[in-house]
Structure formats: C-alpha cells, structure tokens
Amino acid sequence: MRAIILYDSHTAGGSTDKLIDSIGAELAKNGAYVEKAKCKATGDYNFIQDFDVVIMGAPIYYLLVSSQLLGALIQSNLKQNLKRKKIALFLTCGSPEPMATLLYLPQLKMHLVRNRILAEKIFSPQQLSDPEAIESFAEELSENYKRDTRRRNASMQWTDEALDLLDAVPSFFRNRIKIATEEYAEEMGYREITLEIIEEAKAETGGL
Ligand SMILES: Cc1cc2nc3c(=O)[nH]c(=O)nc-3n(C[C@H](O)[C@H](O)[C@H](O)COP(=O)(O)O)c2cc1C
C-alpha cells in the first residue's frame, strides 16, 4: 500500500506534526510506503495519483478544521484527484469525541461522500502520544485496505487478452495499473476486465 498523509497545522512541530510521524511509522511497520505533505489551499494535488490511500488530518481551531486542508478541498484540484481514492481521516482537538464526531468530522466527510473511508479517528490531547490509539488507527486502516483488496481480487476476472496486455507492462508499473483498473471496474459494476475496459479505465483515470 502506498499512502500519502495530507495534513495541516498552524503549529510547526506541534501535536499534529508529531502524530503524523507516529502514524507514518506505524503504517510502515505494517509494510506500507508512506509520505507526508502539508496542505496548501491553492496547491496542485495531481501527485496524489501516485498513492493508493490518502490519509487526511488536521487540528480544529475555533470550531473549524484547519484552514489549508479545508481550503484545499474547496479551492484546489484536490477533490478531483480524490476520485476513487480510499481515504482515512483523523482530527486532533480538545473537544470530547461525540462533539467532534458531530461537528468537525462532517466538515471533511461532506466532500468525500463517494469515497471509501477505511478508518477515521478523533485524537484527544491524551491520545496524541498514546501508542495504542495510534496503533489501532493504523491497524484498522491497513486491515480494511487488505480486506478490500482481497475482496476485489476474488470477485474480478481478467480475460486472457487483458492479462496478456497487463503482462506486457513493465513490472514496476504493473501492480498500479492492475489496482487502478480493478478499482475502476468495481466502481462501474463490471465483473470481468476486457481489453475494452482497460482502455476505458485508462481514459477515465488519466492514463493510470
Ligand atoms: C487557537 C486554538 C483554537 C482551538 N480551537 C479548538 C476548538 O474550537 N475545538 C477543539 O476541539 N479544539 C480546539 N483547539 C485544540 C486543538 O485542536 C488541539 O490542541 C490540537 O491538537 C492542536 O494541534 P497543533 O499542535 O498541531 O496546532 C484549539 C487550539 C488552539 C491553539
């Protein structure tokens, strides 16, 4: 699994910075390749096409999710690039979890209604350096990603011609193309991947 942590915080070296490093380290222990990127409301997010999972997280300031992450979802090409991406969400805040779930998480989730959310977590100030809380978030994310992949592999058939074409792709690129094509086929309700569907997926996903 290739994961990117897209985050925002007003505080360099603050609690969110430390938390994302811990989440990244925990996911890496489970075999994931993880990068992090700080959000800019007007950034260019085409690079997230290189990742299977997008983990988004930020603190709450004055009742709102930190502005650069929220801004990126509204102003930039982030939402467009999140199409068909698997997502995980986390927030850091001082409010009790029920309040945060009701008031703050929807600020992100309203932009992600068509995405599969693998895991979501509100980190209270006490949990920010609690290895168990971080481990359980990373574990849930990794397990759900693996379960989705197994389910997709079990249900998706490739025709011989489609497999021949896949085999002709350089090996370092093959798995990404396989995943992107299967995810596209799954979303479209196809059960068998043919040459035509590979072409269709290529056109729809911008070449991946
Ligand atoms: C200026 C400021 C405003 C905050 N407003 C809220 C808030 O409205 N609701 C809340 O639950 N937590 C609030 N918090 C708590 C932060 O979300 C929490 O401390 C978070 O971990 C800070 O992350 P950081 O260290 O990366 O800045 C606020 C913190 C600060 C400094």
Image (tube, rainbow, N blue to C red):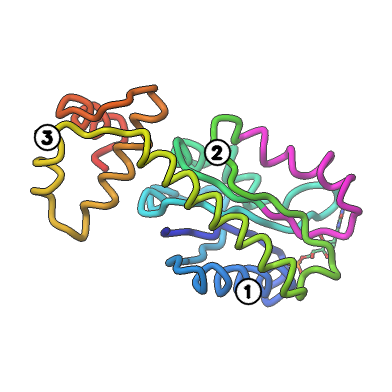
Res 135 quadrant in image: bottom right
- Residue 92 lies in the magenta-colored region: yes
Residue at the image position 27 percent from the left and 52 percent from the top: 175
Residue at the image position 33 percent from the left and 29 percent from the top: 185
Calculate the distance from the C-alpha at mark 3 to the C-alpha at mark 1: 43 Å
Image quarter for ligand 1 equals: bottom right
Mark 3 secondary-structure assignment: helix
x then y, percent, for residue 172:
21, 60
The segment highlighted magenta reads 90-111
Residue at the image position 13 percent from the left and 50 percent from the top: 169
Q: Looking at the picture, does residue 85 appear above or below residue 39?
A: above
Q: Which residue is mark 2?
A: 116
Q: Which residue is mark 1?
A: 22
Q: Which residue is mark 3?
A: 160
Mark 1 secondary-structure assignment: helix
Q: Are marks 2 and 3 in contact (CB under 8 Å)?
A: no
Disc 2 marks a residue whose amino acid type is Arg
Q: Earlier in the sequence, mark 3 or mark 1?
A: 1
Calculate the distance from the C-alpha at mark 2 to the C-alpha at mark 3: 30 Å
